[in-house]
Image (cartoon, helix red, strand yellow):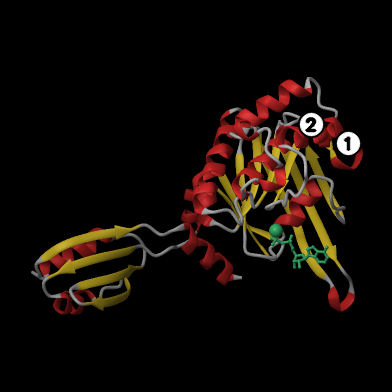
Amino acid sequence: MQAVSVKGLNKTFGSGKNEVKALKDVSLDIAEGEIIGLLGPNGAGKTTFISILTGLLEKDNGSVNVLGLDLDKDLEKIKGGIGVVSGFSMVSIDLTVTEFLRFFGMLYGVKNLEKRIVEVMKLVGIFERKDEISKDLSSGFKQRLVIAKSLLNSPKVLFLDEPTVGLDVEIAVKVRELILELKKQGTTILLTSHNLYEVEQLCDRIALINEGKIIALGTIKDIKGMLRLSTKIIVVCDDAKKASSFIAKMKEIRKIEMKGNTLHIELEGRDTRKILNALIDAKVGLESFSLVEPSLEDAFIQLVKKR
Ligand SMILES: Nc1ncnc2c1ncn2[C@@H]1O[C@H](COP(=O)(O)OP(=O)(O)O)[C@@H](O)[C@H]1O
Ligand SMILES: [Mg+2]
């Protein structure tokens, strides 16, 4: 069974001149235990997507199935099986960490609440702060507290909307470790991000979203492979000028830039061996020849540009 299955989802805000099509015919399946990243620039539709799936916002049309339940019929049941963390939530409550979790736990009707509170506090690494006032915590601990709250009902599917936005780098690292830990425990996770590095690190698959449409879906390797991304080579040699003029006319070369003794070469395709052989034929003293793999960022920029 898929943990989440979305088909033909549409959402429009406003009307007439102010109409914004936030989601256009979006379909997406998420397997049980998978971490999938929804990656896209600001305004792409990420938050709208998560808000609809978690019942915060109504869809125009399309079907949404979470944990085998139809959103239109069983929203309350779905809510019992999912957790949501939306953005960097401001915690400005005068309750201690334990009291904060107890408050929401009672609201959600969590069974064996006191035991579960200790479990989630330990899981997110906030147990040592259990008696501190929530609003006085550092931003990193506030984010952990919000994640702890989302875990109270032992959710099978977790929705994380920009879980590290606004956090210091080292705190973001800790939150990412926590996300991987939750995956290890079998939680299915949909996270949104505009941070390529983050999704590359965490996700089994990514969906690139732009202007309300999913424009690519697959593993990072798949997505890079879908595009004819240029391979880059960096060559250091004793006579860059000679080397450059020797290979410049080859059909495999897209672009050459010379910086002192270094050549930055952009290739058409991936036949690096041919270039290396040509440079050897040119009899320039080669000091190094290195390949730069295309990044996900290159892929994303190219995909967005294409449209
Ligand atoms: N409540 C709303 N009313 C009107 N327009 C909205 C509303 N929420 C989002 N939008 C618009 O929908 C589009 C998608 O927004 P959003 O889902 O927040 O994008 P993201 O989370 O990817 O940055 C944007 O153009 C945004 O301005
Ligand atoms: Mg958003």
| Sequence-wise first label, 2 or 1 | 1
Name the element at disc 1. helix
Report x, y in % for residue 119.
66, 25
Q: Which residue is mark 2?
A: 102
Query: Quick one: quadrant of the N terminus?
Result: top right
Name the element at disc 2. helix
Q: Is residue 148 left or right of residue 283?
A: right
As drawn, the label of residue 40 is: none
Name above or below for residue 209 compared with residue 113: below
Name above or below for residue 206 compared with residue 67: below
- Can you tell which of label 2 and label 1 is closer to the viewer? 2
Report x, y in % for residue 44.
68, 63
Q: Are marks 2 and 1 in contact (CB under 8 Å)?
A: no
Q: Is residue 307 left or right of residue 285?
A: right
Residue placed at 87% from the left, 39% from the top? 75
Q: Which residue is mark 1?
A: 76
Q: Residues within 10 Å of mark 1 (few under 14, many from 20)?
A: few
